[in-house]
Image (cartoon, helix red, strand yellow):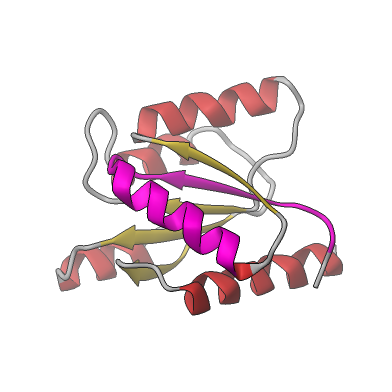
């Protein structure tokens, strides 16, 4: 297991989901710095601030679809306008069972997949392994 910290951004307006994800992160055994934002606009502000401070961006972003202010799709559109060249793995994390949401996720180049809630320890561990492999390759 790698010793460097994985930076995770969770964008979800549900405090209970954020709490559950935090607990799952702890159970994976990975060294993770988790930041949670409750809507897409707060996440865009966080990314913009991180860039302006020249700090490391998250390597992994989990995005809920239905949120106030900026929903998951609007976040992706706003993110696309930031012209960030760093590769960030993004996954839609949603309780939506609508096929059109899953299909829409595939239209975004930045979105690597669609995960149905609830998030499992196994699935999150898989995502961390992918991030780990990519950072060892770069």
Q: Is residue 30 left or right of residue 118?
A: right
Q: Quadrant of the C terminus?
A: bottom right
Residue 50 location, quadrant: top right
Residue drawn at x 30%, y 48% is 16
Q: Position of residue 75 (x, y in %)?
A: 37, 39
Q: Position of residue 33 (x, y in %)?
A: 65, 46
Q: Quadrant of the N terminus?
A: bottom right
User: Magenta stretch containing residue 15, yes or no?
Assistant: yes
Specify the segment rendered in magenta: 3-27
Q: Is residue 130 left or right of residue 120?
A: right
Q: Is residue 34 left or right of residue 74?
A: right
Where is 6 relative to 46, above or below?
Answer: below
Where is 123 relative to 96, above or below?
Answer: below
Q: Position of residue 29 (x, y in %)?
A: 67, 67
Residue drawn at x 39%, y 68% is 119
23 or 65, which lies in front?
Answer: 23
């Amino acid at each position: 297991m790698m010793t460097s910290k994985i930076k995770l951004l969770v964008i979800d307006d549900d405090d209970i989901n954020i709490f559950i994800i935090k607990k799952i992160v702890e159970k994976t055994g990975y060294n993770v710095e988790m930041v949670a934002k409750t809507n897409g606009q707060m996440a865009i502000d966080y990314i913009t601030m991180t860039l302006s401070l020249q700090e490391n961006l998250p390597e992994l972003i989990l995005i809920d679809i239905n949120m106030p202010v900026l929903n998951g799709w609007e976040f992706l559109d706003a993110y696309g306008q930031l012209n960030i060249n760093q590769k960030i793995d993004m996954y839609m994390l949603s309780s939506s069972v609508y096929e059109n949401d899953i299909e829409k996720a595939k239209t975004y180049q930045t979105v690597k997949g669609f995960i149905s809630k609830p998030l499992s320890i196994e699935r999150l561990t898989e995502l961390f392994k992918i991030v780990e492999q990519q950072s060892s390759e770069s």
